[in-house]
Image (spheres, grey):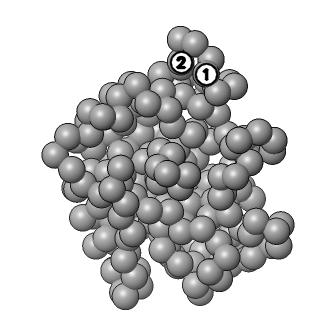
């Protein structure tokens, strides 16, 4: 990867299958509920030096809407990125028209604009003017891949894909989704918490 996006830390995303998994704690991953991996599957991450880290998926449960959470057989090491979610706020309209980093099934990053943010969902649009390079129409197989808001150089997880086109899916700044996700995390393995970051 070249250009300014090469500084993005994607080590917390498992791309070894099209059904992508994204770390939200050292032991929990999220995915699209309609396109989920199964317990027993091998999960592979790579740290920023390219070193391979393998875990096994030992449990998966649905959370809400198109969100599912999975449990790894043990914690991942600290050199893998665990992504923060947006800290809840009354109004996320400040995000409309800003740029998000959108990933696809072939381990590539694209840049789309945020079109709307609802109480539990978010949707993107293709920029009218290509500001940062290129975009992509999301297709079958891209489901569950994560999208990020870039906050002071850090990738903050805002969505995993449900629909195609410019993309849309569950919004991880939603208090409802965060509450249900936290409960599911505790059900699978207590003692872990989501990390939140103010945008």
- Looking at the rendered image, the quarter that the N terminus falls into is top right
Of helix, strand and loop, which one carries label 2? loop
Q: Residue at x 51, y 46 (%)?
A: 150
Quadrant position of residue 22: bottom right
Q: Percent from the top left, x then y, of residue 130? A: 62, 17
Q: Is residue 18 left or right of residue 124?
A: right
Q: Is residue 1 above or below residue 80?
A: above
Q: Is residue 172 left or right of residue 155?
A: left
Q: Is residue 15 above or below residue 57?
A: above
For label 2, the residue is: 127
User: Are the residues flagged by discs 2 and 1 in contact, CB closer than 8 Å?
Assistant: yes
Which of the numbered marks, if any, corresponds to residue 99?
none
Q: Percent from the top left, x then y, of residue 195? A: 39, 69
For label 1, the residue is: 131
Instruction: Decide if residue 30 is in sight here.
Output: yes
User: Tag count in the figure?
Assistant: 2
């Amino acid at each position: 990867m070249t250009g300014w996006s090469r500084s993005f830390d994607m080590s917390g995303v498992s791309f070894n299958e099209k059904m992508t998994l994204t770390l939200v704690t050292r032991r929990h991953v999220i995915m699209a509920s309609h396109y989920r991996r199964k317990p027993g599957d091998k999960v592979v991450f790579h740290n920023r030096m390219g070193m391979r880290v393998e875990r096994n998926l030992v449990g998966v449960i649905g959370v809400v809407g198109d969100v599912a959470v999975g449990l790894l057989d043990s914690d991942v090491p600290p050199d893998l990125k665990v992504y923060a979610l947006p800290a809840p706020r009354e109004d996320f309209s400040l995000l409309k028209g800003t740029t998000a980093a959108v990933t696809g099934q072939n381990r590539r990053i694209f840049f789309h604009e945020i079109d709307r943010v609802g109480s539990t969902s978010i949707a993107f649009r293709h920029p009218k003017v290509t500001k940062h390079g290129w975009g992509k129409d999301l297709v079958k197989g891209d489901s569950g891949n994560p999208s990020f808001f870039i906050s002071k150089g850090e990738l903050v997880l805002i969505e995993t894909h449900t629909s195609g086109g410019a993309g849309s899916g569950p919004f991880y700044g939603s208090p409802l989704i965060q509450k249900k996700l936290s409960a599911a995390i505790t059900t699978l393995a207590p003692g872990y918490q989501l990390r939140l970051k103010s945008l």
